[in-house]
Amino acid sequence: MLNWLTPQPTESSRAAPAMPSMGANDGTEPSLAWLPNALQNAGMGSLLSHGAGLTLLAPSEAALHGWLASQGRSHADWLTDAESLRRLLLDHLLPSAVGAAQLLQAQALSSLGRVPLRIEATMQGPMLVDAQQRRARVLRGDLRLGALRVHLIDEVLLAPQQSLLELLAQRSDFCDLAEALDRSGLTCVLRSQGPFTLFAPSNDAFAGLAVRLGLRRRSLLADTGLLLDVLRYHLVSGRVAFADLPWGGALPTAQGTSLRLSPLGLIGRGDADAQPLLPGRELHASNGVLHPLTQALLPPQR
């Protein structure tokens, strides 16, 4: 059914399809002249005839050249690299037909290349925000390249490159969590491919947890059994973005019990734990997603 996912050999004699009116490369408007050849060279040319149920967020020629320059690559060289072409195209390909108006009203999206996207309202209008916090504006929407729906955007969208542990290491507000993960032995788990969803208590949240348990901060961090139990309660298998959280339901945790999510948008049990999660605050990593917490969560029986 998705036979276009299997790279097809490129025949030098096969001519690229003619570009529709998407903006000529004459300096008057953004251009997508690179796209037909890129699809063919990536072995994804069948999208032109069988891609009606998909949507491509296609960077403009200028955006593509700027990104390639930042990578130290030439446009001509890149167009002969089938694997790089394929990766970039999948990173920008949505798994359903999404019109421009629907796209900009969505809360969150994910490409076939697993690039998580969210929509952010700005003074310049709605923006697509990728995992590396790069913002892209839709320059022209609802274009057609053969059967494929195309939205022209002004940036290249990028997948997350850092792991969950690397994200934590860069954030001073998660120092206690990073130390706790190391002491409990969970860093070995979070070094793996996962994916995982980590509900991440801040330093202040850890200080509050110690007070609730009647411990000093150092005593809490020294109790590896307690740490392991608490931290596993913050860890969920799979990549669960904010838009995918089962409000009104529960998530099974690595600790063995489930984490409750109320229909009102609160996570946790009772007054001590319950706290809101806000859209747009999660951080995406190569092996999962991190949701910052202002309070640590205590598993049942604690």
Image (cartoon, helix red, strand yellow):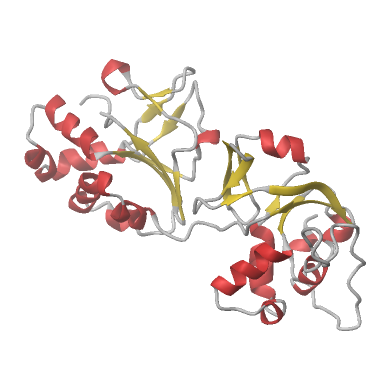
Which of the two residues, 67 or 214, is positioned nearer the viewer here? 67
Identify the residue at image location x=33%, y=34%.
293
Which of the two residues, 132 or 300, is positioned nearer the viewer here? 132
Which of the two residues, 75 or 168, is positioned nearer the viewer here? 75
Looking at the picture, how far across and down is residue 85, in whole percent?
68, 70
Residue 126 found in image quarter = top right
- Position of the N terminus, as image quadrant, is bottom right
Looking at the picture, how far across and down is residue 102, in whole percent?
73, 35
- Above or below for 41 versus 91: below
Is residue 228 rendered to the left or right of residue 142?
Answer: left
Identify the residue at image location x=20%, y=26%.
302
Looking at the picture, how far across and down is residue 61, in whole percent?
73, 65
Q: Residue furthest front?
A: 28
Residue 41 found in image quarter = bottom right
Number of marks drawn: 0
Which of the two residues, 150 or 181, is positioned nearer the viewer here? 150
Is residue 197 rendered to the left or right of residue 114?
Answer: left
Looking at the picture, how far across and down is residue 76, in whole percent?
71, 81
Identify the residue at image location x=50%, y=32%.
245
Identify the residue at image location x=29%, y=58%.
188
